[in-house]
Image (spheres, rainbow, N blue to C red):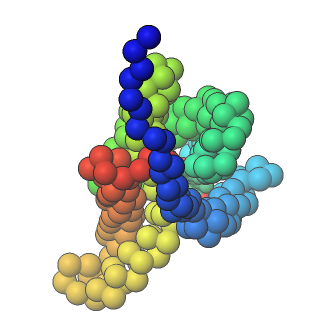
């Protein structure tokens, strides 16, 4: 029997691996507090339902109020369940809960909220630019929602994540329009006496509302695209 020579085993020194630092999404908690507080404020005028406390003029008929309250209720469900979906612990440790709250987000949140508000957007007293802005946002909400749902069902989870970031940015646009309305009001009021406005309250209201919706949309959707690009865009960054 021939014996083959074997090199003596040399113990290779084990290099201590640097501990992989888990990057925590520290901004989730303050964002969640602001989002929940804003939703509570927005919903407070409609729960319990009373047309007298509505912040929107619903004097054109009870049907308007019914659609409005339905929209507010479903939209609030969407905002709160959507917030849960971004919680990394929920996604990673409790995927079943993530799936169920996701179903509530779609079927008890955005889709019924879209149907309810689509019926009343055209009644807005704030002018055509505002109405077109609202329908644009609604279209984006619908499109990204369907794309996100289809991607999840086809198990294309990378696509699903991106579509849902865009979709939730659209959800949050409705919240951002509130402070943005105040900023717009200050900008427009500072020019109320100029020849452009001539203290015309209707023109001031239209500009405030349409500037508010378009600016809010640009900001939230822009941030969402930037976030997607940074997190998934260049392939060098680690996925959550
Ligand atoms: C993102 C798509 C959304 C669009 C296009 C949209 C559009 C609208 C429109 C046009 C109105 C006024 C309806 C009327 O004149 O009767 C309205 C009202 C309202 N929406 Fe939405 N909405 C969206 C999402 C949301 C979300 C996510 C919430 C969160 C809770 C929300 C909460 C409300 C509330 C509270 C009102 C009543 C008005 C007020 O009290 O300020 N909406 N929405």
Q: Which of 179 and 95 is in front in this view?
A: 95
Place of residue 133 in the rendered image (x, y in percent of width and height, measured from the top left): 34, 51
**Residue positioned 26% across, 82% down in the render:** 198
Going by the picture, which residue comes out furthest to the top?
1
**Residue positioned 34% across, 82% down in the render:** 187
- Which part of the image, by quadrant, shows the N terminus? top left
Place of residue 234 in the rendered image (x, y in percent of width and height, measured from the top left): 26, 50
Determine if residue 110 is in view: yes
Report whether 98 appears left or right of 160.
right
Determine if residue 76 is in view: no
**Residue positioned 46% across, 19% down in the render:** 154
Going by the picture, which residue comes out furthest to the left?
195
Going by the picture, which residue comes out furthest to the front?
1
Report whether 189 appears left or right of 10.
left
Q: Nearer the viewer, residue 167 or 178?
A: 167
Place of residue 212 in the rendered image (x, y in percent of width and height, measured from the top left): 38, 65
Q: In this view, does 79 lie above or below 190?
A: above
Q: Which of 219 and 191 is in front in this view?
A: 219
Report whether 52 appears left or right of 157.
right
Place of residue 210 in the rendered image (x, y in percent of width and height, measured from the top left): 34, 61
**Residue positioned 31% across, 51% down in the render:** 236
Q: In the rendered picture of this protein, how many numbered marks are placed on residues?
A: 0
Q: Is residue 191 above or below residue 173?
A: below
């Amino acid at each position: 029997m021939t014996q083959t020579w074997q090199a003596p085993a040399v113990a290779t020194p084990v290099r201590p691996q640097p501990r992989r630092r888990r990057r925590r999404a520290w901004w989730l908690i303050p964002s969640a507090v602001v989002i929940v507080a804003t939703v509570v404020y927005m919903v407070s005028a409609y729960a319990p339902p009373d047309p007298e406390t509505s912040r929107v003029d619903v004097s054109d008929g009870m049907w308007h109020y019914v659609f409005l309250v339905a929209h507010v209720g479903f939209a609030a469900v969407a905002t709160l369940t959507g917030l849960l979906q971004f919680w990394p612990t929920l996604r990673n440790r409790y995927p079943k809960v993530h799936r169920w709250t996701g179903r509530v987000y779609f079927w008890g949140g955005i889709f019924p909220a879209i149907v309810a508000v689509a019926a009343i957007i055209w009644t807005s007293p704030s002018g055509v630019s505002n109405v077109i802005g609202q329908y644009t946002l609604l279209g984006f909400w619908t499109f990204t929602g369907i794309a996100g749902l289809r991607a999840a069902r086809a198990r294309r989870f990378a696509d699903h994540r991106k579509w849902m970031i865009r979709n939730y940015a659209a959800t949050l646009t409705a919240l951002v329009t509130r402070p943005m309305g105040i900023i717009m009001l200050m900008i427009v009021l500072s020019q109320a006496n100029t020849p452009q406005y001539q203290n015309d309250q209707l023109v001031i209201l239209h500009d405030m509302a349409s500037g508010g919706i378009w600016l809010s949309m640009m900001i939230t959707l822009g941030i969402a695209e930037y976030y997607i690009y940074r997190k998934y865009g260049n392939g060098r960054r680690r996925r959550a």
